[in-house]
Amino acid sequence: MTKTVFATPDDQGAPVELTPGLPFTTHTVIVATEKEAAWSFTPIGQKAAFEVNHGPAALEHYGDADLARFCIAKLTIGNPPSGKQLGSYAFSVSNGQITVTPTWVNIPPPPVPTQVPAVNAKLALAQAGQLSTVKAMIAQADEAAQIWWEAATVFQRDHPMVLTFGAALGLTSAQIDDLFRLAVETI
């Protein structure tokens, strides 16, 4: 998902983001957020700077050349790399050109559910290629483990059986967490 921001130099030439809902602070261009709908905008070239009075979304209708006349630059931040999201961005000016530099951060993994329906857990094990191994382990386990496997309606992440069978499979704690996350997505 791309993000377009609007920036203009301040009195010292440093770039300032034009935040939707706030007025422009330079070049007497005023942006109002109420009353006028985006579809009713007047082309910026037909108005003086002090007459421009549209919601921030309407700026997307103006061409780059029209915006540039009022020292407004549209800066687009592209799609993030795989597994990343936009954390922040910074502006800079070089030779009169405003540029935006994004900082990408890792997308945090979803939280680990504390419990999942047993059917989802078994489907996640099947999807991970572990179900037949677990079934073989259960067949060799004591009666309590077999009853738990067959009768449980939910599997709790911190249940002793989950921890025991996870260790027997050679799974790390993070891998068990991933199985629980997968179980939430499984239908």
Image (cartoon, rainbow, N blue to C red):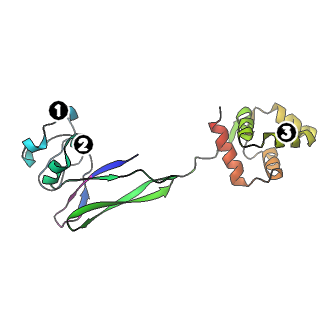
Query: Please, what is the three-letter code of the amino acid marked with disc 1?
Result: Ser
Q: Are marks 1 and 3 in contact (CB under 8 Å)?
A: no
Q: Residues within 10 Å of mark 2 (few under 14, many from 20)?
A: some
Q: CA distance from mark 1 to mark 3?
A: 66 Å
Disc 1 on helix, strand or loop?
helix
What residue did someone put label 3 on? 135
Q: Which quadrant would residue 47 be assigned to in this image?
A: top left
Residue 40's tag is: 1
Q: CA distance from mark 2 to mark 1?
A: 13 Å
Image location (x, y in percent) of residue 160: 81, 47
- Whether residue 113 is visible here, answered yes or no, is no
Q: Is residue 45 magenta?
A: no
Q: Residues within 10 Å of mark 3 (few under 14, many from 20)?
A: some
Residue numbers of the magenta segment: 6-14
The residue mark sitting in front, 2 or 1, is 2
Q: Which quadrant would residue 59 be assigned to in this image?
A: top left
Image location (x, y in percent) of residue 8: 21, 57
What residue did someone put label 2 on? 60
Image location (x, y in percent) of residue 148: 84, 36
Image point 18% across, 45% down: which residue? 31
Query: Please, what is the three-letter code of the amino acid marked with disc 2?
Result: Glu
Image point 82% across, 44% down: which residue? 161
Image point 34% across, 61% down: which residue? 90
Q: Is residue 7 magenta?
A: yes
Query: Please, what is the three-letter code of the amino acid marked with disc 3?
Result: Lys
Between disc 2 and disc 1, whose residue precedes?
1
Q: Residues within 10 Å of mark 1 (few under 14, many from 20)?
A: few
Q: CA distance from mark 2 to mark 3?
A: 58 Å
Disc 2 on helix, strand or loop?
helix
Between disc 1 and disc 3, whose residue precedes?
1
